[in-house]
Image: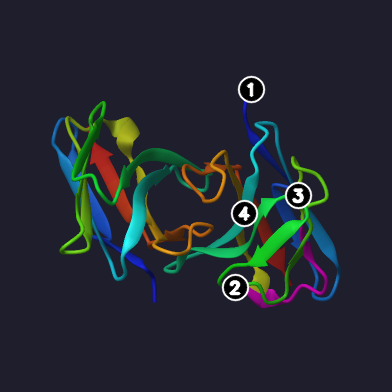
Amino acid sequence: EAQVTQNPRYLITVTGKKLTVTCSQNMNHEYMSWYRQDPGLGLRQIYYSMNVEVTDKGDVPEGYKVSRKEKRNFPLILESPSPNQTSLYFCASSPRTGGTGELFFGEGSRLTVL
Amino acid sequence: SQQGEEDPQALSIQEGENATMNCSYKTSINNLQWYRQNSGRGLVHLILIRSNEREKHSGRLRVTLDTSKKSSSLLITASRAADTASYFCATEKTGTASKLTFGTGTRLQVTL
């Protein structure tokens, strides 16, 4: 089944404790992206990747890192999480080269930072 | 501020009625997309309309795009309780082919 898989789905952590949210897609998509969703703010893009080893900042990259060593994986790293990073995170991928096109989303990772 | 702004923020209708949601945006676009999100779940792509298209259909969905007014509408005909969800428009701005910017969504409630 074609899908985007995120882990963990739910996580409660404490300020400053490094964490990684994994994202994997099995559709051989070149484009991948991370979004965060907060009430009243919609979805905001954190980082995106057009292809392996190519990543770039979205609208709200502060406090996050990403890597794209393989086509299928695009982990989101929070080196020192803070309470303002409490949010619902979505990973998405797209088959379209040179742009976004239709995005396929994972089920989301709900992160709480205490 | 958001590139896409949906209107209304919330909509409640009865099963069988039509639901219309609107999206306005600020800058020129390559395409505009509509997504659906069931509560707390991942977004699901519904339809994409390119800047040179004016109308598109997919099943019970009808999307229009007016680039002169920088607006789009999503019509769901003969709504069902299962259509209850949040609906988001997303725009790919001209010159930013790597970025899709989402609005804040319309919450649709369809009651029996």
Spatial CA distance of label 2 from label 1 is: 31 Å
Work out whether mark 4 precedes mark 2 in sequence or the reverse, and give the earlier one: 4
Mark 1 lies on a secondary structure that is loop
Contact between marks 2 and 1 (CB within 8 A): the answer is no
- The chain carrying label 3 is A
Contact between marks 2 and 3 (CB within 8 A): the answer is no
Where residue A112 sits, quadrant-wise, is bottom right
Residue B34 location in percent, x, y?
Answer: 35, 46
Q: Which residue is mark 1?
A: A1
Residue type beneath disc 3 = Val
- The chain carrying label 2 is A
The local crowd at label 4, few if under 14, some if 14 to 19, many if 20 or more residues have their Cα within 10 Å, is: many
Q: Which residue is mark 2?
A: A60
Residue type beneath disc 2 = Val
Residue B57 location in percent, x, y?
Answer: 23, 32
Q: Are marks 4 and 2 on the same chain?
A: yes
Contact between marks 1 and 3 (CB within 8 A): the answer is no
Work out whether mark 2 precedes mark 3 in sequence or the reverse, and give the earlier one: 3
Work out whether mark 4 precedes mark 3 in sequence or the reverse, and give the earlier one: 4
Q: Which residue is mark 3?
A: A52
Could you tell me which residue is drawn at 43 percent across and 40 percent down? B45
Q: Nearer the viewer, residue A69 or A8?
A: A69
Spatial CA distance of label 4 from label 1 is: 20 Å
Quadrant for the N terminus of chain B in the image:
bottom left
